[in-house]
Amino acid sequence: MLFDERPKERKEDLFDREKEVSALVRNIRRPLIVITGVRRIGKTSVLLVGLNEAKENFILIDFRKLKENYGRKDLYSLFSSALSSKLGYLQDVLKKVKGIGIMGNYVEIKWGGRNYLSLTDLFDKLNEKRLIIAMDEAQKLRGPISKEVKEAIAHAYDYDRNLTFILTGSEVGLLHELIDVEIKTLPFSEDTISK
């Protein structure tokens, strides 16, 4: 196939986004990066290629998988799946965390009950290792549970030096509302990424 519209993962397959990928890789150690742009412009491709070019460990969460009226269980299930994809790298950290179970190759986060693990506590534990937490289509995080995510990211921004959060989305206002931090975004223009 000569042209594939699906998101790219390799630099050689990506067309005309070298500047954006380069800016992402150059700034990969910052605590928070936001990639914005209109729908279907290539944000996910820039994210995937940038993550692969940076050659750092990352987990990727696609929030399009959330139902419209999602709950904590749905949200934590996405995080569980993402953590499972990096179990080899994170196992020594995760096996020490109360509220996380490892069954074979799958990580289960306790989302309720006595052994409930908050996202803030999870991020603090993940901070033992260098990790990028990429959140594709982050504007889908709406509703009452979004406050938990917002507060966890804000806490990690201040205290978890080994974590980088990368958020993508087409609804800029909702992204800024979610993270509630003064930032410059990486839109598809010549802007650079900063705090």
Image (cartoon, rainbow, N blue to C red):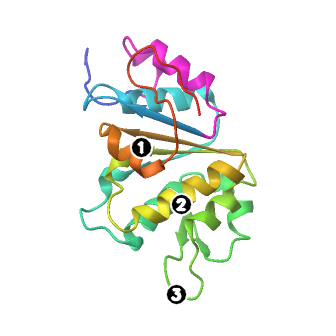
Of callouts 2 and 3, which one flags the residue occurring earlier in the amino acid sequence? 3
Q: In the rendered structure, which amino acid carries the disc numbered 1? A: His
Q: Which residue is mark 3?
A: 113
Task: Look at the image and tell me whether residue 177 can be seen.
Answer: yes
Of callouts 1 and 2, which one flags the residue occurring earlier in the amino acid sequence? 2
Q: In the rendered structure, which amino acid carries the disc numbered 3? A: Gly
Which residue is painted at 25% across and 29% down in the image?
40
Q: State how far apart marks 1 and 2 are (Cα).
A: 13 Å
Please identify, in this view, whether the residue under mark 2 or under mark 3 is nearer the observer: 2
Q: Position of residue 112 (x, y in %)?
A: 49, 82
* Mark 1 touches mark 2? (CB < 8 Å): no
Describe the element under mark 2 as helix, strand or loop: helix
Q: Magenta segment, which residues?
A: 9-31
In this rendering, position of residue 148 left or right of residue 121 = left
Q: State how far apart marks 1 and 3 are (Cα).
A: 32 Å
Mark number for residue 176? 1
Question: With respect to residue 119, does 73 lie above or below?
Answer: below
Q: Position of residue 10 (x, y in %)?
A: 46, 23
Q: Which residue is mark 2?
A: 151
Mark number for residue 91? none
Which residue is painted at 42% across and 51% down in the image?
178
Few, some or many residues within 10 Å of mark 3 (<14, 14–19, 20+):
few
In front: 97, or 177?
A: 177
